[in-house]
Image (tube, rainbow, N blue to C red):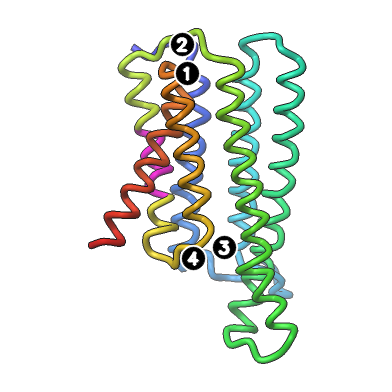
């Protein structure tokens, strides 16, 4: 039996798993290659990515609010809330920069021939990635630290743990897909840092469901990436 107190958590983690699936379908399917409007300002694949990022961010926000609702600690809650807003801004700015410039880069600057294309390429592959990693790191740190500051009083059952691990596997698969089959850069260090922190926090508070979720997701992602790269 799944403990009623963890049902909202399972639902919100399930949203993140669904987003991972939809992102993969959006990126791999040819159906999203068409243009959003007659002026060809953006492809559906780019717009869909921005919408899915919004869905993921809203689910993270609701998850943070759910975790913090267990106790009345206004100072900690406010500090983590401000940090979440900062991370959300960076993440949104990164998607707004990346999706537009990626479209322009692929369509008009596959072989950069002038200064404009060099700038577009840097926004696509450089600046937007740095903002994404910064926002991604802050958001995930806030979620884990919210669990630490507001520990769950509900002990996860075996069924709870299984569902947490299942949702974590979707995130781990997404990490492998992004690291194992593309050139690895700064993203590896971000994933490794989050994995290390998740393991450390889980060691200190082993019964907390979100810490279990992050530890499984990021360790599986790192191990899966290493296996894929070495075979």
Q: Say whether residue 178 is left or right of residue 129.
A: left
| Residue 24: x %, y % from top left | 45, 55
Q: CA distance from mark 1 to mark 4?
A: 35 Å
Q: Is residue 169 magenta?
A: yes
**Which residue position holds label 3?**
45
The kind of secondary structure element at disc 4 is helix
Is there CB contact under 8 Å for labels 1 and 2? yes
Q: Residues within 10 Å of mark 1 (few under 14, many from 20)?
A: few
Earlier sequence position, callout 1 versus callout 4:
1
Tell me what residue is drawn at x 65 percent, y 45 percent.
Answer: 54
Earlier sequence position, callout 4 versus callout 3:
4
Q: Is residue 156 above or below residue 83?
A: above
The kind of secondary structure element at disc 2 is helix
Tell me what residue is drawn at x 65 percent, y 63 percent.
Answer: 98
| Residue 155: x %, y % from top left | 42, 10
Tell me what residue is drawn at x 44 percent, y 57 percent.
Answer: 178
Q: Is residue 188 above or below residue 42?
A: above
| Magenta part of the chain | 166-174
Q: CA distance from mark 4 to mark 3?
A: 9 Å
Q: Residue furthest bottom?
A: 113
**Which residue position holds label 2?**
4
Q: Nearer the viewer, residue 107 or 127?
A: 127
**Which residue position holds label 4?**
31
**Which residue position holds label 1?**
7
Q: Is residue 50 above or below residue 15?
A: below
Q: Is residue 63 magenta?
A: no
Q: How many marks?
A: 4
Q: CA distance from mark 3 to mark 2?
A: 37 Å
Mark nearest the camera among 4 and 3 is 3
């Amino acid at each position: 039996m799944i403990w009623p107190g963890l049902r909202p958590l399972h639902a919100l983690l399930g949203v993140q798993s669904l987003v991972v699936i939809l992102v993969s379908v959006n990126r791999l399917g040819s159906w999203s290659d068409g243009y959003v409007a007659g002026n060809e300002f953006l492809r559906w694949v780019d717009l869909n990515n921005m919408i899915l990022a919004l869905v993921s961010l809203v689910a993270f926000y609701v998850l943070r609010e759910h975790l913090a609702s267990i106790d009345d600690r206004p100072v900690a809650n406010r500090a983590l809330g401000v940090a979440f807003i900062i991370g959300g801004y960076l993440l949104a700015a990164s998607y707004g920069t990346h999706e537009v410039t990626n479209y322009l880069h692929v369509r008009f600057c596959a072989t950069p021939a002038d200064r404009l294309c060099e700038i577009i390429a840097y926004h696509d592959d450089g600046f937007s990635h740095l903002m994404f990693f910064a926002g991604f790191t802050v958001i995930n740190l806030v979620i884990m630290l919210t669990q630490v500051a507001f520990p769950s009083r509900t002990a996860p059952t075996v069924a709870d743990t299984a569902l947490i691990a299942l949702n974590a596997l979707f995130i781990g698969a997404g990490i492998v897909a992004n690291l194992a089959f593309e050139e690895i850069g700064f993203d590896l260090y971000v994933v490794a840092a989050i994995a290390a922190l998740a393991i450390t926090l889980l060691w200190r508070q082993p019964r907390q469901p979100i810490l279990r979720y992050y530890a499984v997701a990021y360790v599986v992602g790192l191990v899966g990436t290493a296996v894929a790269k070495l075979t």
